[in-house]
Amino acid sequence: MLSYQPVIPVPFMTLDEYSRHSGISKASLRKMIGDGRMIIKKKDSPREHPQINLIAIYERATRETMAALG
C-alpha cells in the first residue's frame, strides 16, 4: 500500500500558472484538455478561463503508481 500525504498548494490553477509550474506549453495544455488528458474545473460561463484541477492530477498519478507497483 502506498502511503504518503502530498501537499497540494491549491486545488485549481489557471493555464498560465500550470504552464509556468510544469514547463508544459499552453498550446500543449489546450490539446490535453481537448482530448481529456487534463481535467479542468467546470466553467460557470463560456468566457471563463479554464482552471486545471490539481486534485484530479494527483489522484490519477496515485492510481497509476498503484497499478504500476501492483
Image: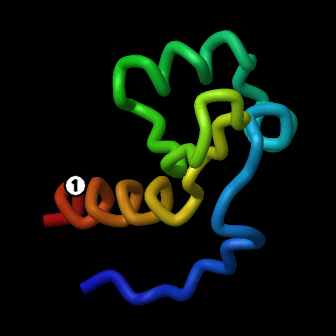
Query: Is residue 16 depicted above or below 43 in this figure?
Result: above
Which image quadrant for residue 34?
top left
Query: Is residue 67 depicted above or below 9 in this figure?
Result: above
At mark 1, the secondary structure is helix
Question: In the visual, does 23 lie left or right of 31?
Answer: right
Whole-percent x, y for residue 3 in the image: 40, 89
Q: Name the one closer to the observer, 11 or 65.
A: 11
Q: Would you name the residue on which mark 1 appears? A: 68
Q: Residue at x 76, y 71 (%)?
A: 9
Amino acid residing under circle 1: Ala
Q: Name the one closer to the observer, 60 or 70.
A: 60
Q: Residues within 10 Å of mark 1 (few under 14, many from 20)?
A: few
Q: Residue at x 48, y 22 (%)?
A: 32
Q: Residue at x 67, y 58 (%)?
A: 12
Which image quadrant for residue 69?
bottom left
Whole-percent x, y for residue 36 in the image: 35, 29
Question: In the visual, does 36 lie left or right of 69?
Answer: right
Q: Residue at x 22, y 55 (%)?
A: 68
Quarter of the image where the N terminus is located? bottom left
Q: Name the one closer to the observer, 15 or 68.
A: 15
